[in-house]
Every structure is written in structure tokens, then in C-alpha cells.
Image: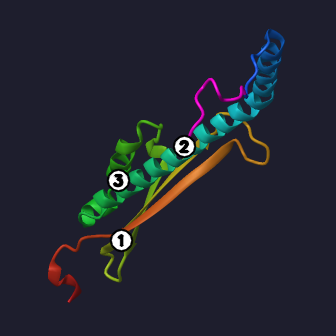
């Protein structure tokens, strides 16, 4: 049989005002000690997220330019149009046409067989970290085969 509330022994004592003030002071000291570490962790996580997002956008820009250049031989040789297509997806982080380069691989007959598009973006961190550079270059290259003018070209 379980004891009733009147039969149970009192296990807690009433908290005095002085003990409550000491606990509150200890919590304030713990917060003061931990706050710089928490702030650093927050800023580091934000920088990591920004860098990851920038790498995804740079990859998408390079892929978009390579897909445009792989449409046919004329598109593969039109580097200005490849640059324009590549930067369309990167306007939110500031990718410009100066950051995009393209190269065309040709066969023995000077017919384009593949297009390579490279996007190089300078990423700046929010703050300086020990042993981590504050400026990082994120570079991605995508290679896609150019669609042949006629299907019988390679047979």
C-alpha cells in the first residue's frame, strides 16, 4: 500500500532567499563563461552554411553553362553566350562573367566533341578564424559532350 501525502516524509526543504540568489548568480556566471563559445559556434556554423551554399551555386552555374554549350557545335564555340548562361543562376551570390571560362575539345576534323566550363568564385568569411584563411576560392569545372550535328557522324 502506498503512503498518502500526509504519511510521506518531506524530502525537500523550503528554499531561502539567499540560496535562490546564489543559484541565480551561478547561472549568470555560467552564461558569461559560455556565451563567447556559443557565439563563435553560431558564426562558424553560419560561415559553413554560406560556403556550402556558394559551392552549390558555383556548381550549378558551371553545369548550366556546359549544358548550353553542349547543344551544338555553334553553341560550344560561343563563349560569350556560355558565360551569360552560366551567371544566370549565380546572381544571388555575385557570380559575374569574369569568373566564368570555357574551353572546347575538338576531334581531328576540328569538330567540337566536349565543352568544359569553369567557374571560380572568391568566398569571404564573416570573421577571421585561427588557421583558416578569410578568403577561399571555390572553383568547379563541368565537362559535357557536345551533341553531334548528325547521328551518323560517329559511325
Q: Of discs 3 and 2, which sits in the foreground? A: 2
Please give the range of residues in magenta.
1-10
Q: Is residue 73 above or below residue 98?
A: below
Q: Residue at x 29, y 57 (%)?
A: 68
Please give the label number shown on residue 49.
Answer: 2
Comes first in the chain, label 1 or label 2: 2
Q: Nearer the viewer, residue 140 or 99?
A: 140
Spatial CA distance of label 1 from label 2 is: 33 Å
- State if disc 2 and disc 3 touch (CB < 8 Å): no
Residue bearing mark 1? 114
Q: Is residue 19 above or below residue 114?
A: above
User: Circle 2 sits in a helix, a strand or a loop, which is it?
Assistant: helix
Residue bearing mark 3? 82
Q: Nearer the viewer, residue 117 or 55?
A: 55
Q: Position of residue 46 (x, y in %)?
A: 58, 37
Q: Position of residue 82 (x, y in %)?
A: 35, 53
Comes first in the chain, label 3 or label 2: 2
Spatial CA distance of label 3 from label 2 is: 28 Å
The total number of labels drawn is 3
Q: Nearer the viewer, residue 61 or 73?
A: 61
Amino acid at each position: 500500500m502506498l503512503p498518502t501525502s500526509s504519511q510521506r516524509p518531506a524530502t525537500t526543504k523550503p528554499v531561502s532567499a539567499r540560496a535562490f540568489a546564489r543559484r541565480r548568480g551561478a547561472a549568470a556566471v555560467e552564461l558569461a563563461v559560455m556565451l563567447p563559445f556559443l557565439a563563435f559556434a553560431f558564426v562558424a556554423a553560419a560561415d559553413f552554411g554560406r560556403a556550402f551554399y556558394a559551392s552549390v551555386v558555383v556548381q550549378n552555374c558551371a553545369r548550366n553553362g556546359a549544358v548550353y554549350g553542349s547543344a551544338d557545335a555553334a553553341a560550344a564555340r560561343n563563349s560569350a553566350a556560355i558565360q551569360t548562361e552560366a551567371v544566370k543562376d549565380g546572381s544571388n551570390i555575385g557570380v559575374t562573367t569574369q569568373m566564368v571560362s570555357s574551353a572546347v575539345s575538338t576531334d581531328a576534323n576540328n569538330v567540337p566533341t566536349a565543352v568544359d566550363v569553369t567557374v571560380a568564385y572568391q568566398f569571404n568569411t564573416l570573421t577571421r578564424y585561427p588557421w583558416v584563411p578569410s578568403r577561399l576560392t571555390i572553383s568547379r569545372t563541368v565537362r559535357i559532350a557536345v551533341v553531334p550535328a548528325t547521328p551518323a557522324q560517329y559511325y
